Amino acid sequence: MPLNHLRHHERFDYRPITDRDDFRWPGGASLAVYVGVNLEHFAFGEGRGPGIAPPAPEGEPDVLNYAWREYGNRVGAWRFLEMLEALALPAGVIANTSILDHCPELLEAFVARGHELIGHGHTNAERQGQMSPADEAALIARSRERLAAHFGTPPEGWLSPWISESDRTPDLLQEAGFTYTLNWAHDDRPVTMRTRHGRLLSIPYPQELNDIPTISTHRVSMNEFATMMRDQFLELLEQSRHQPLVMGIALHPWLTGQPFRLRLLRKVLSDLAGYREADGVWWTTPGQIARHAVQQGV
């Protein structure tokens, strides 16, 4: 092996954005936009969770951080549902299966209104990439089977809890029947990934327009986050005049479902929702993006 050889994932080849696709999204649109709503549940007093506030000392239940996140399932997510319905926007609902144990009526309400269901493991209190091969395969299979049993249709897409992957994750997803993943944020368009038994599509999922790293980790204000959303939208819309592109917005109801942030979120989404297919914008879901991309030979 050459001394300068670097380990490669072998999932896809390098392709510059200047190597353009020449198809269009439905209705002649050039920019596909989706809202990803993360519905997550965390174990009480154990496992992982975003440290919104300093964690409690070891051995003491972390009531503050748990309750903060639980606000999203009790209040924030329901406000999201009302907002999406008022703006006639579809969403991809990225859901832990533990939601079915904790508050099934929440997930049922989103699915009943036509939003797409996306697998997100069992709980965000654990990292998928640290599991044994057998345990990871079982997690993926059980998550898909349980959502299918409850709602009648299996999810097409997957986002790992914490976006945690092992070297085998894309293979296991494809073998379990998933057609796309949101784990990789490396392009502004769908990318075909190689697996040991077939193809898996990567749909862009944002790490910048994602409220957890932006607001919680980098301490960006909601005003700035709203500006980021607007600028990202307008810039990608301009760039998409030359090729079809994808924009995702990742939201967590315990964070941007807080009333003072929700007010600004509703305002910016209301402004952006005024752009429709006549303006080159297709408001959609990751699953619809994946299906259309496959039809176009991506």
Image (cartoon, rainbow, N blue to C red):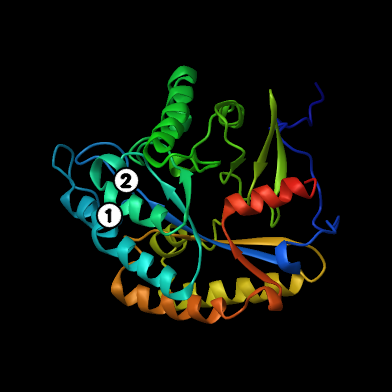
- Which of 201/185 is in front? 201
Residue beneath disc 2: 49
Between 205 and 224, the one nearer to me in the picture: 205
- In the displayed structure, 265 sits above or below 137; it is below
Mark 2 crowdedness (10 Å alpha carbons): few <14, some 14-19, many ≥20:
many
Nearest to N terminus: mark 1 or mark 2: 2
In the picture, the quarter occupied by the N terminus is top right
- In this rendering, the label closer to the viewer, 1 or 2: 1
Report the residue at 81% width, 53% height from top.
Answer: 16
| Disc sitting over residue 69 in the figure | 1
| Label 1, residues with CA under 10 Å away: few <14, some 14-19, many ≥20 | many
Q: Which mark is residue 139?
A: none
Disc 1 residue type (three-letter): Arg
- For the residues labelled 1 and 2, say whether their Cβ atoms are less than 8 Å apart: yes
Q: Secondary structure at mark 2?
A: loop
* Residue shown at 44% from the left, 62% from the top: 211
Q: Up-down: is 206 above or below 134?
A: below
Residue ID at (75%, 47%): 295
Give the image location of residue 120, x and y in percent. Answer: 44, 42
Total numbered labels placed on residues in the image: 2
Which amino acid is tagged 2?
Gly
Q: Is residue 242 left or right of residue 201?
A: right
Estimate the spatial distance between the alpha carbons at disc 1 and disc 2, rounded to whole Å.
Answer: 9 Å
